[in-house]
Amino acid sequence: MNQHLEIRNFLIQALEANSEEKSIQWLKQKAQKIQESNSSTPLFLAFSQASRFFSKDLLILSEQEKIQVDQLVSAFEPAHWNRLQAARSFLLLNLPQEKESWFSAMNQLFETADMHEQHALFAALPILPFQEDLLTRAIDGCRTNMTLIFDAVALNNPYPASYFPEANWNQLVLKAVFMQRPLYRIQGLEERRNSALAEIASDFAHERWAAGRNVMPELWRLVAPFMNDQYLADLEKVLNSTDDLELAGGVLTLYESDFAPAKALLADYPDLLAQVESGQITWQKIGKEYQDSRV
């Protein structure tokens, strides 16, 4: 069984556990029409009509299902999808994979889709065929100022980490910082940190400080592996903050660094260091608390 068929089967099984029987019957009928048609019209119609049959409630997956889908596509997280997204993605996977006609249909979908339809399309990138050929489309998705669309590409999506060249990857991460999106939800962030991105992050912090504005505490995660005297001076400023999350981010950055002066500075914060070592301070907790503080 090929990967796309396995993903398709996974999605329909997950939807069967989350949706009404009449909705599933409709979805299966439309999928068959899409498979059998020589035209992309059945896909266009079903993709639009799916909102009548599936809600935007979260797709509930068991822990076993989460493990199962991760084995199909590494780091793929449909647990962050809603049921309508899952149904639309299932429909996409029924489109015959003749490359020219497939791209003709997909390009038309992307260009005519409303915001929620685009959200589903971009979030589905890691499970679609012709992955490398979708790169330009994925990069275009990151240029939007619509948070819903940007998040579909940037957050909980393994596609950018797998395919984006460094310059485009850095632009995605910087835009996430600029839009104050949760960096801990960017797949592959740890592995794809780079010295150019660290420099960009430091420059961004200086611009914010010069304007009298704060810096999101997750930003310093980008700097940790590349610590030097310049970045250490930035961290000293961070650690003079009265904000608990900024202090936590600063100490965690020092903890992750191998730079000897950073370790020396870290020794001045034994209580926070103990919280890092006990797992009370993590990037995920910092990111979640920071997002909650903005609501």
Image: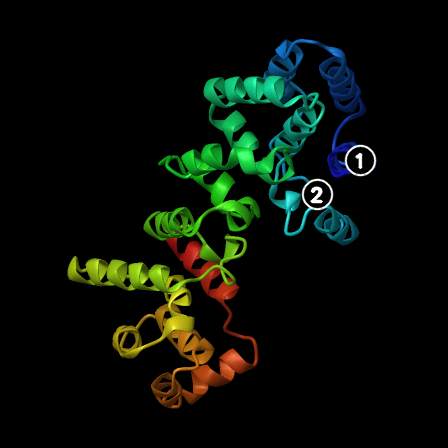
The local crowd at label 2, few if under 14, some if 14 to 19, many if 20 or more residues have their Cα within 10 Å, is some
Q: How is the image coloured?
A: rainbow
Q: Give me the disc on residue 60.
A: 2
Residue 85: % across, % down: 61, 32
| Residue drawn where x is 25% and y is 61% of the image | 203
In this rendering, the answer to whether 151 lies above or below 271 is: above
For the residues labelled 1 and 2, the Cα–Cα distance comes to 12 Å
> Which one is nearer the viewer's eye here, 1 or 256?
1
Q: Of helix, strand and loop, which one carries label 1?
A: helix
| Residue drawn where x is 52% and y is 51% of the image | 161
> Which one is nearer the viewer's eye here, 203 or 177?
203
Q: Amino acid at mark 2?
A: Ile
Determine if residue 249 is in view. no
Q: Is residue 177 left or right of residue 32?
A: left
Q: Point out the residue furthest to the right here.
A: 1
Give the number of the mark in front: 1 or 2: 1
Q: Which residue is disc 1 drawn over?
A: 13
Residue 246: % across, % down: 35, 69
Closer to the chain start, of discs 1 and 2, is: 1
| Residue drawn where x is 57% and y is 48% of the image | 158
Residue 228: % across, % down: 31, 77
> Which one is nearer the viewer's eye here, 85 or 197?
197
